[in-house]
């Protein structure tokens, strides 16, 4: 079957999402976010799991209803196996297994990070193989060589913290509300990116490090506040812009190196941090400078969503890559 109809479920962190895809075309993509974490300044795994349990049936129902697809029309059920939070993954995995078993249709396990990359095949224009994808999120920072829809190789990654964590932790130091990364991006748009200098990490080959900049920002703020108690308040936009510029420079320094070494002009970004306006604009600037063909997903496909899971499942279905009922979540799932 070249045009399978697949229900996909994403529950790796704090977004419950379901999507329906038919023949590689996304018919619906429903996402429910969890506001319960705001008061804690970060995702609480146990609360996320409980919220997924509450949300999953309404979200799946809405996805099928929006797509105008009945359960009997489904050819497979896909779900995120990992990486992610164990309890959150368990909800999506258990529901998908039960749903597929009840309908007597195949089950497809999807790697969350590979799905982020395949989000580029939801809409046009689509990258040509091979291409490099800078995959950036709260938990991952990777440069991936994408050879085909299902053949990918990580050629560089962070040796410590993910860039998304660096954004969020810096935002927390500055007293910005959760979610910190998007708030820092918003403030950065109003500031001077050259106001303050922070170190750019430089690891071997195509790898990254972001622990150093977090420490640098921490000590910088400590010393400045000691001299002026209102320093952060008076310079918030400039601090945000300066930190953001440094993080983006760290990312693109290695991406440029990899693109040059491998002689690849097809460049993409994926993951939650790919929604960052500064990164998106800088990548567009680099596209002109280095004559790259750059691919940036729509905002709705940057953060966690089931449409990207559905797209990955579509190609896995065509290959006959199915899971059995013994499959279980894998929080540290690798490529």
Image: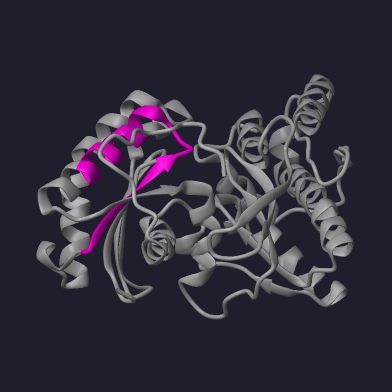
Vertical arrangement, residue 292 with respect to residue 274, above or below: below
Q: Is residue 72 magenta?
A: no
Report x, y in % for residue 65: 15, 66
Q: Is residue 59 left or right of residue 151?
A: left
Query: Image quarter for residue 233?
Result: top right
Q: Is residue 82 magenta?
A: yes
Report x, y in % for residue 299: 50, 63
Q: How many marks?
A: 0
Report x, y in % for residue 306: 36, 56
Can see residue 48?
no
Can see residue 235?
yes
Q: In the image, what residue occupies the spot 45% across and 62% down?
A: 300
First to last magenta residue range: 75-97
Q: In the rendered image, which quarter contains the C terminus?
A: top right
Of residues 267 and 241, the one drawn nearer to the viewer in this rendering: 267
Q: In the image, what residue occupies the spot 51% across and 58% down?
A: 302
Query: Image quarter for residue 71?
Result: bottom left
């Amino acid at each position: 079957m070249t045009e399978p109809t697949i229900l996909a479920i994403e529950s790796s962190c704090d977004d419950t999402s379901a999507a329906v895809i038919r023949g590689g075309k996304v018919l619906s993509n429903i996402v429910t976010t969890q506001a319960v974490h705001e008061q804690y300044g970060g995702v609480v795994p146990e609360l996320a799991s409980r919220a997924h349990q509450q949300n999953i049936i309404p979200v799946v129902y809405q996805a099928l209803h929006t797509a105008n697809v009945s359960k009997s029309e489904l050819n497979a059920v896909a779900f995120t196996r990992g990486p992610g939070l164990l309890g959150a993954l368990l909800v999506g995995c258990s529901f998908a297994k039960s749903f597929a078993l009840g309908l007597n249709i195949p089950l497809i396990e999807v790697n969350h990070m590979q799905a982020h990359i395949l989000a580029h095949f939801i809409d046009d224009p689509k990258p040509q193989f091979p291409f490099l994808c800078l995959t950036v999120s709260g938990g991952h920072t990777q440069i991936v060589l994408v050879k085909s829809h299902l053949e990918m190789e990580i050629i560089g990654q962070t040796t410590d913290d993910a860039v998304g964590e660096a954004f969020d932790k810096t935002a927390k130091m500055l007293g910005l509300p959760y979610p910190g990364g998007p708030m820092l991006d918003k403030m950065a748009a109003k500031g001077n990116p050259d106001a303050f200098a922070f170190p750019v990490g430089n690891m071997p080959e195509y790898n990254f490090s972001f622990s150093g900049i977090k420490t640098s920002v921490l000590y910088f703020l400590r010393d400045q506040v000691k001299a002026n108690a209102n320093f952060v308040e008076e310079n918030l936009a400039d601090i945000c812009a300066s930190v953001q510029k440094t993080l983006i420079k760290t990312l693109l320094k290695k991406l440029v190196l990899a693109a040059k070494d491998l002689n690849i002009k097809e460049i993409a970004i994926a993951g939650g941090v790919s929604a960052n306006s500064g990164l998106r604009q800088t990548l567009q600037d680099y596209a002109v400078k280095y004559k790259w063909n750059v691919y940036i997903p729509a905002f709705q496909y940057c953060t966690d969503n089931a449409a990207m899971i559905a797209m990955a499942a579509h190609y896995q279905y065509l290959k006959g890559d199915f899971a059995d009922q013994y499959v279980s979540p894998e929080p540290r799932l690798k490529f």
